[in-house]
Image (spheres, coloured by chain):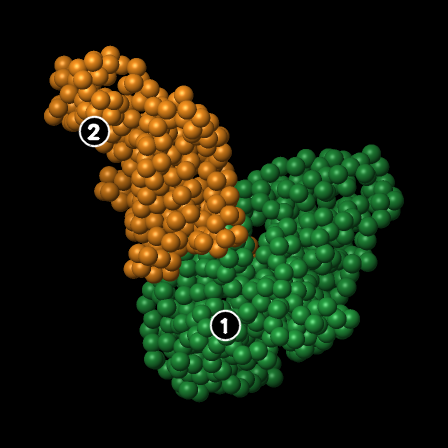
Chain colours: A green, B orange
Amino acid sequence: MTGTIIGFGKTAGQTRWARGATLAATTLALALSSSTAVLAEDAKFDPNASITIGSLYEPQNLDNTAGAGQGINEAFNGNVYEALFTLTDAGDVQPGLVAEQSVSDDGLTYTFKLRPGVTFHSGDPLTATDVKYSIERVTAEQSKSSRKKSLATISAIEAPDDQTVVVKLSARSISLPYNLSYVWIVNDAAKDLNASEDGTGPYRLDEWRRGSSLALIRNDKYWGTAPTNGEVVFQYFTDATALNNALLTGAVDIITSVQSPDSIAQFKDNPDFTVTAGQSTTKELLAFNDRVAPFDNVKVRKAIARAIDDKKLLTSIWGEYGTLIGSFVPPTDPWYVDLTAVDAYDVESAKALLKEAGFADGFTFKLDTPNYDPHPIVAQFIQSELAKVNIKVEINVITANEWYTKVYKAHDFQATLQEHVNHRDIVFYGNPDFYWGYNNPKVVDLIKASEAAANTDEQTAQLKEANTIIAEDAASNWLYLYPQIVVSSSAVTGYPVNGLNSQFFAFGIKKSEQ
Amino acid sequence: MLTYLVRRFAILLLSLLIAAVVLFVLLRLLPGDPANALLSVGADAVQIEKAREQVGSNLPLWQQFLRFAGSLARFDLGTSFVSGKPVIEEIAARLTVTVPLALMGFVLSILIAVPLGILSAVKADRWYGGLISTVSQLGIAIPVFWVGILLVTLFAVTFRLFPSGGFPRRGWQNEGQVLYALALPVMTIGLVMGASLLRYVRSATQDVLGSDYLRTARALGASFPEALIRHGIRNGAVPIVSILGIELATTLLGAVVVERVFALPGLGSMLLLAIEQRDYPNVQGVLFISTLLVLLIGFAADLTQRLIDPRLRERAVGGNA
């Protein structure tokens, strides 16, 4: 599934399209043909252009194993550091630094042959030792990578020769290539990866001005296809309005992710800008504490799902953007099934379910609401929706930090709102100790089995089944999927539109000659 | 004068100490764990415990305070939880934005306020005298971020004369670019601070105009401008210097808001980010350094007043300071 292109650039030939009757057909064709914005593909581009990317996610350090880091993944994944495998913007896993791979029959030994002729930015050649070192950095005890657990099945890594890496597992792990797609391959001789880098990617770090910008310059010795621009500067903003103004005045070329639909209007019908709506993986969630009454009752959870008009909520927050989802799985995950019909909006049946559950007169619960957008608005919407079925919602506004301590760590809550950003994170429902406490042994088994699957078809089938059960159980209420909106000057094209796992590949960006 | 200096300095140190304690206590009263700054959803219990150890939030409050006080005593502001870098390093980098911004805004506000303030006092009976003082009233009523947004809309988005925000990548290596980038932020501060300063200048001038010494000087044959320059300015300057001190401190704090509007990597944006991330050492560091700056400004203003007006010095010797 790829993005849909909404706005059109001023480039030759395109204005006519935008006005023509073939608009819809063309848009669809373009959207299907590639996962990136392909406007002005034929226009002359400047191979040495400097691309300025405006973002709200400033990295705090340059090492993604040293703490939470959406910003550093955005700037560095695939641009500065590469992995053995690459998660493409369309959601496929493809070989990155791996040239060939073979898997033993029992699925416990993976042998990777590295791509020859790859060097780090420092000039050191890429060897199997670097790969071993890089994976062990993520799985190390002191690593703070949130993905550490998914690599827990790795029991040993061997480097029989410079070009060969053998990964041994304690249990089958079909997601290994996917999981390796966020393990940066770093030079084992590199020092201080918090403030500098030594990767193999198409760009090397030129300068990092904390609080302001991060500049990447083209790596002329890159092993793969050379970037279609000369350098990329990530310019950081704390205020969305300031970021929009920067795009309006030409100070930045692209905004990686627009967080407020109101600001889209000024770009949308303007031929100087391109607005692209892709598929994000960020899900807005009403999560219950499934351990405690009344949310330990499936009927109550289903009733709440039926009492809330998700469509109305999405439209009031995002207008024409965003997608409704019936479960935790976004369309870019291989095991997506359309489950929006499960517990669809139906106030009468919600009332009936509540009566069956013994809550004919309703009940009251406390909704822990993070204090930043869009949660407070969503909370109020839910409050008024649930009032229709006699459920009283007490909104308790908390900070993100409190959420982490109270809800995530202590499980001290009844219900909460949260956005979950990653691709392929259905596995959280297979963990009964997770904050929402959903515990269905069948789902736990399916998710566990899917990881040990012999092939991806089997894995997909099992996760589809798990996904369906989770939806039928109304484990949580999945309100909507955020849109991923990228806005750019119409002079630039070729950027990723889905931004999976916060990646923003910059090497294909083209800027037309002025 | 020396006794005064020593005493004034002791008060400065005591104020800093109180500020440090208040800061520490206030930050710890907030709910939530600073270790969360390092974690993301998906972290397990072991990672959480590691993070708590790393930031010291697993220790009892009094031990945390001792650590904090101990490092302050060594002039060490600690290391950021999030970036792992010394706080003082980051503050130093940010001050290269905030200090020039505040100072330029301050100078601009004086350039606006002093001539216009004197003019509106001297020519209070003319239409423009009244207009200046009305406009300055309006200037005080408008919040600083609003002026910033108006200037951006007008001079950046509409006329494309100045950038709407951001700071040049190479920083002060290219002064021209920095000045260009700071043009609108400096104007914002200059206009807002200038408007409130103008009123003080106006009323100080009015006091001088109605004073006996000015009348005497004129009776002795001095022209009005001569009398104003020889006697008026020196007398009028004393209250204005103390207001200038307060204004400079306010400008520094006003820069926090302006930095956000214009996406400038100064102390203010560092503070906001640090609060969002619950990066205690950074929050403490920024607030501590700003407190220090404000106290130093007050100190300097007091001293300047004493240098201008001998009467204040005599009183100080008499022990009334």
Is B289 displayed left or right of B50 in the figure?
left
Q: Quadrant of residue A44?
A: bottom right
Relative to B38, is A492 on the left or the right?
A: right
Residue occupied by mark 1: A514
What crowding class fits label 1: few (fewer than 14 Cα within 10 Å), some (14-19), or many (20 or more)?
few
* Rendering coords of residue B183 (x, y %): 39, 49
Left or right? Give the position of B121 relative to B228: right
Q: Position of residue A161 (x, y in %)?
A: 41, 86
* Kind of residue at badge 1: Gln
Q: Secondary structure at mark 2?
A: helix
- Whole-percent x and y of residue A243? 51, 54
Between tags 2 and 1, which lies in front?
A: 1
Q: Nearer the viewer, residue A200 or A175?
A: A200
**Cα–Cα span, label 2 and label 1:** 56 Å
Q: Percent position (x, y) of residue A273?
A: 59, 63
Q: Residue at the location (53% across, 74% down)?
A: A512
Residue A352, numbered circle: none
Q: Which image quarter is the C terminus of chain B in?
A: top left
- Name the secondary structure under disc 1: loop
For mark 1, name the chain.
Answer: A
Residue in the picture at 71% in, 59% down: A323
Where residue A327 sits, quadrant-wise, is bottom right
The residue carrying mark 2 is B304
